[in-house]
Amino acid sequence: MSTTAIIDLDLPGPVISRHVYGHFAEHLGRCIYGGFWVGEDSDVPHVRGIRSDVVAALRALRIPNLRWPGGCFADTYHWRDGVGPRQDRPRVVNSHWGDVVEDNAFGTHEFLDLCEMLDAEPYVSGNVGSGSVQEMAEWVEYVTRADDSPMAALRREHGRDQPWRVPFWGIGNETWGCGGNMRAEQYASLARHYSTFVRDQGGNHVYRIAVGPHDDQYGWTETMMRSFDDLAADPAAPADPFQAISLHYYTMTGSWSDKGAATEFTEDEWYLALSRASRMEEFLARHSTVMDRYDPHRKVGLVVDEWGTWWNVEPGTEPGFLYQQNTLRDALVASTHLDAFHRHADRVVMANIAQTVNVLQAMLLTDPDSGALVLTPTYHVFEMNTGHHDAASLEVHLRDAPTAEVDGRTLALVSVTASVKGQGALVSLSNLDASEPREVVLDLRGRTVECQGARILTAPALQSHNTPQDPAAVAPTPFEGVREHPRGLVVELPAHSYVTAELRLT
Ligand code: AHR
């Protein structure tokens, strides 16, 4: 039996912010050092120490924003350690990630230079766990002021005359865990305090993102939303202390002590991973419901600034460096999450997959010996979806969608989302079925369409992945399986595949 996806092209919904396609770069393993940064003396082609191939690959994704310097690292990071002449920067210990010595070669100027190369908006996570209000306030002053304030003068001494535009500021990270092990009430007060001093300066407008919950911690969301109810009700009060709260959720098939293998997995673990990934939908819906009680007009955003798969590290690699391979399964975990963000575009304003290069569910892997760059299957899903950036979401109603019972939950085996921008529309279709093809009729209402082209991401094995020796084992190819149908179009989805179809509204 075929599945029907009913889509009314004449009823555009909330805009899918391009920022849900954001990324995350932490001082962790080989993400910064060896991933983005090779240094000015490297043989690897670079501009001012930043790898040129990595920049080119991410520009092709139209990367909208980049979060830095952590993660847990952010709450140990003191920004002054990473500015000024490199040879004078102090060495510090990266206590969270491998206990390695960090030489601070990559700091604020290098990060903002990278963002300019990428044409991405910076998202800086401030240090609440071990920093101070003054330190964070001065960081904002340092990067954003054009005048001769003390911090702007220091920036000039360090070689940068013009301020940068830095819109996104995180008020700490995981303050319920590595960022300070705080109670919700305790952090909510601190967030109000810090936010007061993370302010607009020099024409730069700040968007403050406070630490929100992880997984199903609805109580944390409740406390955060309640914490500024009095300010919202007081017309004399200054602007809201924060404009968004974060949400973190990682997909694994095991537990925190044994998360499951990245490439050596069974068909059951394929389904388990996708079922766990699909919980994002439930978390978004339920955290939004809590937020709606305090913020019915949805002014406060939800920023999913850490998400993705977290597997056991590749055998033989440093456990603290979180280096993992990335298969077709990761690609479908990604498409499942992105679909959830599209469906919740009215609340989810931004998201950052963890992490961009060589760490967790990376876009890019760099070979430490040859220097080769590999694009992962997850990279290809992001690239195939660029048409959704800033497009209006379209509601998709599925009829006769196949399901499977996995891990005590019902997993929908077909996922479809769509968006429209001008005279173009993009439809994304995931077939999570490991072995069965699926036919999906796109019942397109309101407008007539022509299919301009389609692409498919699939591979012979569920475990297929890309390596320097076989870099295109999982890569998109043109797809011929979209045909006209009396109701619109029909798509023949092969087993375990991801398809995007570009439509022109006529
Ligand atoms: O992304 C890896 C780590 O996961 C981050 O540093 C932390 O915020 C989360 O626990």
Image (cartoon, helix red, strand yellow):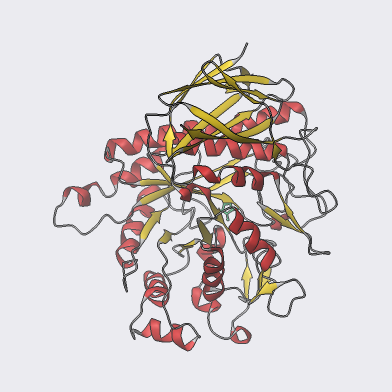
**Above or below 64: residue 44:** below
Residue shown at 42%/29% (left/top)? 9
| Place of residue 301 in the rendered image (x, y in percent of width and height, measured from the top left) | 37, 46
Occupied quadrant, residue 161 = bottom left
x, y (%) of residue 457?
69, 37
Can you say whether 97 is above or below 429 in the image? below
State the image coordinates of residue 206 (x, y, percent, origin top left).
Answer: 35, 62
Reply above or below: 181 against 152.
above
Asked whether residue 216 is in view, the answer is no
Please state, as top left, top right, bottom left or bottom right, where the N terminus lies in the image.
Answer: top right
- Frontmost residue, 193 versus 1: 1
In which quarter of the view is residue 433 placed?
top right
Q: Position of residue 492 (x, y in %)?
A: 66, 23
Q: Is residue 101 above or below residue 500?
A: below
Q: Is residue 452 left or right of residue 17?
A: right
Q: Residue placed at 69% from the left, 37% from the top?
A: 478
Q: Residue furthest top?
A: 1
- 229 left or right of 494? left
Residue at the right extreme of this rendering = 469
Q: Tell me, yes or no, if residue 443 can be seen here.
A: yes
Residue 25: quadrant of the picture: bottom right
Residue at position x 45%, y 64% in the image: 126
Q: Residue furthest bottom?
A: 157
